[in-house]
Image (cartoon, rainbow, N blue to C red):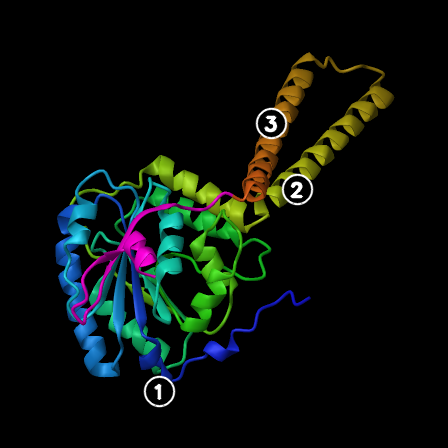
């Protein structure tokens, strides 16, 4: 039984890249106000890539249970120069599930992930594609050039997160890297084969290896609305990433337990030494209460950390689907009309 996977047959060269094409996956959630403008920019991008590389493109919009008119706007977007797929999920499953849905429905060889809020500039995509086709990179990821516009507390939290998740890891996750990245055909095929349901795309895209390069950029201001990622959701995503991709919290709990055990042992020796040398017993009520509260609190923290990992194990054992598609339509740049998945099945 083979426990690995050979994707060498999907290696691309400058000559074969055009035949493979590019799928642009855009997860959207309540982005109806700016989706048409983003699509116009993607049409211009597709024309540029077609002229420079002869690269056929498609865009896959994944509506993650939007509550506004995002789905209606997406249905009406024209297939000008590039094919258009609209995948509507049955509810809001979260961005990681939406990214996976887009990856599953991508029809071209290479896959590019970008947000639908306009902060990932389509003009930068040409540079990412050049690194793939001209320079032979399999994973071209982007990262914020700086965080000068963020608070000191947030910058410290980000650095702490990456320091903890990379602690002892063989494959490091680049700091400040985002979901805006391009995967070559073999990198995309490798990412599809990872079976876990608790997915952390930044970590998985780094873990698969291959030849990778970083591109720094300045995110554009949001074209409309406000971000839905508040402090609570960011903390939740950080915990999800840590427990899905790293055992660092378990190691930290173990080291903390060893440290407290060492302190307790030394404290016990100091009490014995004082009794032996002076013959006086130390009144221990305050120290006893503080010790019990400290140990009890640490134990609860450790139980919580272990509980997070047990919850991940339970989720994997249940093997529930990551997402459900409620509607799937597509338009072809050659003039083909939109067709739903049910209509295609009936036709077949």
Specify the quadrant of the image occupied by residue 50.
bottom left
Q: Secondary structure at mark 2?
A: helix
Where residue 43 sits, quadrant-wise, is bottom left
- The x and y percentages for residue 96 are 40, 49
Instruction: Classify mark 3: helix, strand or loop.
Output: helix
Q: Is residue 212 visible?
A: no
Image quadrant assignment for residue 181: bottom left
Q: Is residue 67 visible?
A: yes
- Please report the bounds of the magenta region as a residue range: 320-348
- Return the x and y of residue 270 as percentages of the image width and height: 77, 27
Residue drawn 58% across the image and 40% down it? 309
Disc 2: which residue:
255
Q: Which residue is mark 3?
A: 300
Q: Which of the two marks, 2 or 3, is nearer to us in this view? A: 3
Gap between marks 2 and 3 measured at Cα:
15 Å
The residue pinned by badge 1 equals 15
Q: What residue is drawn where x is 52% and y is 51%?
A: 165
Q: Secondary structure at mark 1?
A: helix
């Amino acid at each position: 039984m083979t426990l690995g996977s050979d994707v060498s047959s999907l290696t691309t060269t400058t000559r074969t890249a055009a035949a493979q094409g590019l799928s642009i996956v855009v997860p959207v959630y309540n982005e109806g106000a700016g989706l048409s403008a983003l699509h116009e920019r993607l049409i211009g991008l597709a024309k540029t890539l077609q002229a420079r590389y002869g690269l056929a493109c498609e865009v896959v919009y994944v509506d993650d249970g939007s509550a506004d008119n995002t789905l209606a706007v997406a249905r009406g977007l024209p297939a000008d120069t590039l094919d258009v797929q609209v995948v509507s999920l049955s509810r809001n499953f979260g961005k990681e599930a939406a990214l996976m849905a887009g990856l599953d429905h991508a029809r071209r060889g290479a896959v590019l992930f970008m947000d639908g809020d306009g902060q990932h500039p389509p003009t930068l995509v040409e540079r990412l594609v050049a690194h793939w086709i001209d320079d032979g990179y399999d994973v071209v990821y982007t990262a914020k050039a700086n965080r000068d516009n963020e608070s000191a507390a947030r910058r410290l939290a980000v650095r702490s997160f990456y320091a903890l998740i990379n602690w002892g890891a063989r494959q490091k996750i680049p700091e400040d890297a985002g979901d805006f990245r391009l995967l070559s055909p073999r990198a995309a095929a490798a990412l599809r084969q990872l079976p876990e349901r608790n997915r952390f795309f930044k970590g998985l895209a780094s873990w698969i290896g291959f030849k990778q390069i970083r591109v720094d950029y300045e995110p554009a201001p949001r074209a409309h609305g406000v971000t839905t990622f508040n402090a609570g959701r960011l903390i939740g995503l950080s915990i999800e990433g840590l427990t899905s991709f790293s055992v660092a919290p378990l190691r930290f709990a173990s080291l903390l337990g060893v440290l407290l055990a060492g302190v307790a042992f030394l404290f016990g020796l100091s009490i014995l030494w004082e009794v032996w040398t002076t013959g006086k017993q130390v009144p221990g009520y305050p120290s006893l209460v503080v010790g019990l509260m400290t140990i009890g609190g640490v134990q609860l923290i450790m139980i919580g950390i272990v509980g997070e990992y047990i919850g991940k194990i339970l989720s994997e054992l249940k093997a529930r689907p990551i997402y459900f598609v409620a509607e799937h339509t597509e338009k072809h740049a050659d003039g083909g009309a939109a067709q739903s998945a049910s209509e295609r099945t009936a036709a077949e």
